[in-house]
Image (cartoon, helix red, strand yellow):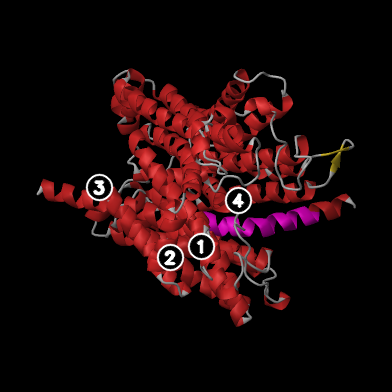
């Protein structure tokens, strides 16, 4: 509940900022709400942002549970998405039910690898995972744009994007969610995201591995004495984080566009941090938090059109202030703990 | 081109490109030596680059831009201190939120001021710096080296990050030391940013820091949180960056290396540096622990 208060404080502060731009905060708020939920079309777009945010929220959260800060979800999802697109373009003959699964497994593998590398470096060499993952984000962006521009460019477009995968790789025809929201990129991978969130919840709280992961995150020394290998756990956690972020390939390539487009992600990886934080790293809470942040993102997209001075970049301000609002909640816990001592 | 000329231009480019890194790295040192993790350096640099360019544009003078960047840096540094020291917010989470905030607020302001999508109008050539920030970066490193070793307040900084309890027991307020250090950290990193927009370029363009705040942090870790070794690490990263710019479009064995491969070189080198060499580098004991 207190986290929702932090969310509200951040949102209100951001809206008050619009006064400086000569806008009416209430008017801006109404634009956000209407643009996010106003029609089935708007809701479809909101849901299409929610799906990758669930994946990224889970990615960041699993890192947090192991005591790691995964800033690398953006790079992990980029590499996975390019991989899925490349597989779909380079192996057009694979028949339908196997094709999307094949591309998905390849994407998970590459996303997982992009998480494993910083996990391994942290566990074995003690390297700072925040800096390593950020550097890997830049590297992923470079490699992906090289793929999109030089290796498998889209012959029918001037945009920096890969060619479209063969139709066997798309599951559109069997997609119930896509049918409810025509003309939007919303697709059945939303269901996959929700199922994955439930599975992660079960993993973390009902399995030995999940317990070990949380033990390393909350008290590495005690975990070590309890016979848990910290190194192994860190590597597993980051590999899983990379694979979760890599799931974005499913919603982006197999579910909707069928290609990798440079800049398709509005920093899903970074918004994932806000999602995980808002949900207190609880996988089930992440579903709701991702929906809220997805709605904010979609809501901000209409600010360009409906106000004179505020652009969609404004969603970044809102996200940042929400993160700060939630992060500052620690202060109240601190105060309460101090009162308890006295 | 003869070899001598190539080497000279490479050395000069290295020094120029090192300047923003050195400022940011020294800023990072102030904060982290006092015990506060600082991944917000990137945002401090962005703000400094932006405010510097805006100040120089309106005042028609680079020094005014520099001064404006100083003030902005002190303010954002103090804001960061408020969150991590007073409100006890998680240092890494707050740092990342600051980076996001800078990425959102700057386009918001450019839209209001210049009706542009995130960049500032170019400043006149004669209002640009020619070499001044480079000299100042050198002086800053020398000054900090001396200050840390020879002064009482320098010792306070080290103790705030190593044994805050001992410092508190000797009657010095750890909170005040950390506040001062983090605020100054903002100023130094903002100068680093301003040297990007007033020295390496002549306007602010979106995301012009390109991860330099994190590279400065890497240089700090690489340099074992000491000014001179961190300075050397900055020179090394800047050299790779200069090399990267030179390599673009170059033919090697009859083949052109894709520009994207060349551009990611500094990031790869940063990872290798962090993974391969530091080994026993030990952060300040109280780094990241609230007090």
Query: Residue A193, position in %: x, y?
Result: 45, 32
Query: Residue B123, position in %: x, y?
Result: 67, 74
Give the labeled residue for mark 3: A1
Residue at mark 4 to residue at mark 1: CA–CA distance = 41 Å
Residue at mark 3 to residue at mark 1: CA–CA distance = 29 Å
Marks 2 and 4 close (CB-CB < 8 Å): no
> What element does badge 1 sit on?
helix
Residue at mark 3 to residue at mark 4: CA–CA distance = 45 Å
Residue A320 is marked as none
Provide the chain ID for the residue under circle 3.
A
Towards the viewer: B221 or A55: A55
Q: Is residue A300 above or below residue A56?
A: below
Towards the viewer: A311 or B149: A311
Give the labeled residue for mark 2: A28
Provide the chain ID for the residue under circle 2.
A
Give the labeled residue for mark 4: B234
Q: Is residue B84 above or below residue B286?
A: below
Q: Are marks 3 and 2 on the same chain?
A: yes
Residue B19 in magenta? yes
Residue at mark 2 to residue at mark 4: CA–CA distance = 44 Å
């Amino acid at each position: 509940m207190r986290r929702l208060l932090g969310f509200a404080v951040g949102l209100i502060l951001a809206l008050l900022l619009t006064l400086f731009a000569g806008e009416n905060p209430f008017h801006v708020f109404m634009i956000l709400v209407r643009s996010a939920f106003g029609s089935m079309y708007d809701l479809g777009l909101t849901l299409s942002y929610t799906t990758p945010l669930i994946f990224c929220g889970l990615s960041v959260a699993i890192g947090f549970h192991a005591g790691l800060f995964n800033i690398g979800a953006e790079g992990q999802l980029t590499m996975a998405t390019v991989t899925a697109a490349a597989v779909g373009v380079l192996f057009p003959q694979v028949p339908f039910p196997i094709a999307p699964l094949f591309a998905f497994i390849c994407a998970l593998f590459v996303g997982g690898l992009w998480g494993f590398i910083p996990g391994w470096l942290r566990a074995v060499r003690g390297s700072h995972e925040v800096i390593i993952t950020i550097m890997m984000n830049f590297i992923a962006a470079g490699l992906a744009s090289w793929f999109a521009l030089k290796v498998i460019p889209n012959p029918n477009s001037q945009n920096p994007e890969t060619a479209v995968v063969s139709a066997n790789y798309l599951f559109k025809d069997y997609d119930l969610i896509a049918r409810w929201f025509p003309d939007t990129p919303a697709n059945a991978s939303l269901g996959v995201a929700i199922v994955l969130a439930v599975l992660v919840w079960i993993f973390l709280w009902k399995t030995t591995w999940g317990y070990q992961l949380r033990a390393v995150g909350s008290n590495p020394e005690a975990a070590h004495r309890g016979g848990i290998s910290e190194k192994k756990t860190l590597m597993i956690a980051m590999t899983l984080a990379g694979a979760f972020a890599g799931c974005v390939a499913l919603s982006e390539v197999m579910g909707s566009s069928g290609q990798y487009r440079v800049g398709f992600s509005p920093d899903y990886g970074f918004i994932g941090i806000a999602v995980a934080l808002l949900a207190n790293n609880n996988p089930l809470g992440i579903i709701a938090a991702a929906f809220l942040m997805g709605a904010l993102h979609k809501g901000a997209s209409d600010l360009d059109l409906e106000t004179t001075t505020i652009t969609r970049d404004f969603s970044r301000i809102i996200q940042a202030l929400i993160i700060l609002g939630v992060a500052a909640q620690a202060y109240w816990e601190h105060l309460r703990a101090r009162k308890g001592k006295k | 081109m003869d070899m001598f000329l190539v080497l000279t231009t490479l050395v000069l480019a290295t020094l120029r490109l090192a300047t923003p890194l050195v400022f940011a790295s020294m800023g990072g040192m102030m904060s982290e030596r006092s015990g506060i993790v600082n991944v917000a350096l990137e945002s401090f640099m962005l703000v400094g680059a932006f405010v510097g360019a805006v100040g120089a544009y309106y005042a028609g003078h680079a020094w005014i831009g520099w001064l404006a960047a100083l003030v902005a840096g002190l303010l954002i540094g103090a804001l960061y201190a408020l969150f991590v020291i007073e409100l006890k917010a998680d240092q890494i989470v707050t740092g990342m939120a600051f980076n996001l905030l800078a990425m959102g607020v700057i386009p918001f302001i450019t839209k209001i001021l210049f009706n542009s999508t995130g960049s500032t109008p170019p400043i006149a050539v004669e209002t640009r710096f020619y070499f001044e920030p480079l000299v100042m970066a050198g002086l800053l490193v020398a000054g900090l080296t001396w200050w840390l070793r020879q002064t009482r307040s320098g010792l306070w900084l080290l103790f705030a990050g190593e044994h805050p309890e001992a410092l508190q027991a000797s009657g010095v307020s750890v909170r005040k030391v950390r506040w001062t250090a983090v605020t100054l950290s903002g100023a130094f990193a903002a100068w680093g940013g301003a040297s990007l927009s007033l020295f390496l370029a002549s306007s602010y363009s979106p995301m012009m820091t390109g991860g330099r705040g994190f590279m400065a942090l890497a240089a700090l870790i690489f340099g074992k949180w000491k000014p001179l070794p961190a300075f050397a690490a900055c020179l090394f990263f800047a050299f790779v960056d200069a090399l990267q710019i030179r390599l673009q479009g170059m033919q090697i064995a009859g083949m052109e290396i894709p520009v994207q491969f060349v551009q990611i070189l500094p990031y790869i080198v940063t990872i290798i540096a962090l993974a391969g060499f530091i080994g026993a580098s030990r952060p300040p004991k109280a780094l990241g622990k609230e007090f």
